[in-house]
Image: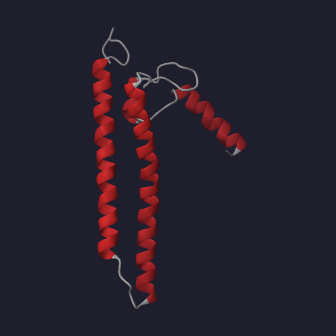
Amino acid sequence: MKKGEAYMNPDHVKHFRNILSTWQQQLREEVDRTVHHMQDEAANFPDQLDRATQEEEFSLELRTRDRERKLLKKIGEAIKQLEAEEYGYCEACGVEIGIRRLEARPTATLCIDCKTLAEIKEKQFGN
């Protein structure tokens, strides 16, 4: 951000839309690769150890893809916020999240103060 520059101006919106769209596309391509890999590599090994190894590999891939599926949902929500001109503002208190924080975590929905408080509460109450 340059001095005197308005927060979430059209250049910022374009920048973050590009980041989010690119990230979304990369994750979708990775999901497609995983599906094809699992289809191509699926085999019924006669050896139990080989079968167990393959099942564990697939299990790890599926867990990773599940995390990425959740991330894709967050990316989609961030893109909707961009379109609604609500992107970059804290859901809890309404202040600017900040360009640097959004650069580090484009799907952030809380400012650093609210996120810190949420993490403290989570540790205290185990939620």
For the C terminus, the image quarter is top right
Relative height, residue 59 to residue 82 (above, below): below
Residue 75 sits in quarter: top left
Q: Would residue 70 be found to the left or right of residue 4 on screen?
A: right
User: In percent of the image, x 51 and y 25: which residue is there?
Assistant: 90
Query: Residue 43's quadrant in the figure?
Result: bottom left
What residue is at 30 percent from the left and 35 percent from the top? 19
Q: Quadrant of residue 117?
A: top right
Residue 30 against residue 10 in the figure, above or below? below
Point 41% across, 24% down: residue: 84
Q: Which of 34/57 is in front?
A: 34
Q: What quarter of the picture does the N terminus occupy? A: top left
The answer to whether residue 104 is above or below residue 24 is: above
Taking 30 as reference, is 76 above or below it?
Answer: above
Q: Position of residue 3 (x, y in %)?
A: 32, 11
Q: How is the image coloured?
A: secondary structure
Q: Position of residue 58 (x, y in %)?
A: 41, 70
- Residue 67 image offset from top left, x and y in percent: 46, 53
